[in-house]
Amino acid sequence: MRGQLSLELVILMLLAILGGAIVTTQLVQSAKDLNLSSEPAKKDIIGVFLGPDSLTLNVETGQENGSIINKQQENNNSNNTNNETNQNTIEQNNEEQNNSILPDLTVSISAYYENGSLCCHGKHGVRNRGEDQQLQNRFRYGKIKVGDKLVIYGNITNIGSADVNKTFWVRIYEEITNKTIATFPINKLNVNETVTFNFTVNVTKDGLKCGKCYCHRYGKCYGNGCSISTLGNVYIITAYVDYTNTINESNENNNIDYVILKRDEDGGQDNGGSTIAGLWIILRGHSYAYITNNSVGGYPVNGDLGYINVRCRAVLGLDVNGVLRSGIIDIRGHGNLYLGNVTNINNLNLIIRGNSILEIENLNITNIYVENMRGRGIIIIKNSHVKSLKINTISCNPGIVIQNSIIDNLQAPSNGVIVVYNSTINGEYIEYTPDYNP
């Protein structure tokens, strides 16, 4: 009996081993038919034996040999994907719905002569909604002269879909000097409601004298007005609504408006000009830039230039037509910039790197600030008058070359190389020196 039992036990064991080998052979063959390598097939097979309930043979795919998949995992992934999609859709709809019921504060500003004629308006004061580009730029800035009296008017309107029920602040200031003319609060502003303000500006030989600002809802504003000295004969009067960013709005990009006033003894409206209020120029590699009062036959530019990148061997020609308010021009590699029709620059900020060269010719410049110069870069100033030239760091040779020019105030590190030809520096005439030390 014991021998028979042992023999039966042995037979059962052999059958079990044989059955396992057949299943293994079938699974490996299925893996080969699916063009899988033997290594993944082994992992799948091990997975089969470790978790027979989690893996099964999919016979619903319509494929000849089928494939091994994890149905439970697939269902879970599908459910998770659907849940995420639904959640994202709900959040997007909620965000769009929330944006659609937010307030939207905007401001427009204009300047008028004492006789009531328009001197200039801001970008939000464009008539005909700005479809006509010529009309849009017609009164973008205006000429003023000593003795002129102006009135600056502004409108603050809630063009959104919800009332503003808490206090926000408005700031009026001159942008180049960052000098505050007035500030005032607005405690509430309903949809389509407008609050107006105004103040006077007297043009004197020393600059602008701004009077008190009045708000039609609250009377006098904070601040007693201010005097703004002459800086390149250009002034940018700016109104900034909700400048502390207190109100959550559907559009945060229309909270600023400004007018540009250019002092000119001929007076009258100005539909042309050649002044740069503020500009950054960055030179890298073997790039080159040339700024002159002569036209370079380039594309006419004014207003806000934004950021321009001149790469490789590209050549960019620009002629200033009016007032260029701000901009950044980044020139790299062997890029070239020609900037023409410029007579006055209020603030020119520079970064010079590599073997780049900048030439400035026949210009009146209020401030040049060189943040840093390194490598073998050169700045050449010819036949120009610069009121202030300040160099933060310089490690270039030759560095700065000044020729037939006047620099009223030059500040530079002692290690900088400055070459001077027939120029007046800090009140001293210098015929020639290869290493000027201010």
Image (cartoon, rainbow, N blue to C red):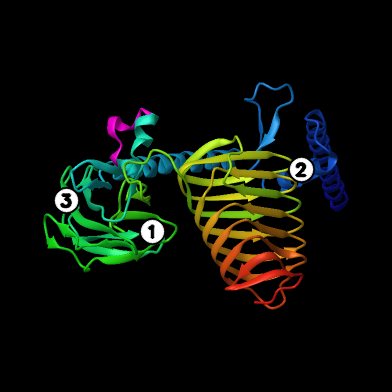
Which residue lies under the disc numbered 2? 45
Q: Given the image, on which type of amino acid does mark 2 rest?
A: Ile
Residue 273, given in percent of the width and then of the height, sits at: 45, 43
* Vertical comparison of 27 with 369: above or below: above
Residue 236 visible in the picture:
yes
Which type of secondary structure does the marked residue at label 2 adopt?
A: helix
* Vertical comparison of 149 with 300: above or below: below
Query: Label 1, label 2: how many angstroms apart (C-alpha)?
Result: 73 Å
Query: Label 1, label 3: how many angstroms apart (C-alpha)?
Result: 22 Å
Q: Given the image, on which type of amino acid does mark 1 rest?
A: Glu
Which residue lies under the disc numbered 1? 175
Q: Given the image, on which type of amino acid does mark 3 rest?
A: Val
Q: Earlier in the sequence, mark 1 or mark 3?
A: 1
Q: Residues within 10 Å of mark 1 (few under 14, many from 20)?
A: some
319 or 189, nearer to the observer: 319
Which residue lies under the disc numbered 3? 195
Asked if residue 361 lies left or right of residue 252, the reply is right
> Which residue lies at the image location 30% right of the left edge and 45% below the top edge?
98
Which type of secondary structure does the marked residue at label 3 adopt?
A: strand
Q: Residues within 10 Å of mark 3 (few under 14, many from 20)?
A: some
> Which residue lies at the image location 42% right of the left edge and 61% below the top edge?
231
Specify start and end residues of the magenta stretch as a single range.
125-132
**Tag 2 near tag 3, CB within 8 Å:** no
Q: Is residue 405 magenta?
A: no
Asked if residue 53 lies left or right of residue 112, the reply is right
Pair 1/2: label in front? 1
Asked if residue 154 lies left or right of residue 295, the reply is left
**Overall secondary structure of the magenta stretch?**
helix
Residue 42, given in percent of the width and then of the height, sits at: 80, 44
Choose top left, top right, bottom left or bottom right for residue 411.
bottom right
Q: Earlier in the sequence, mark 1 or mark 2?
A: 2
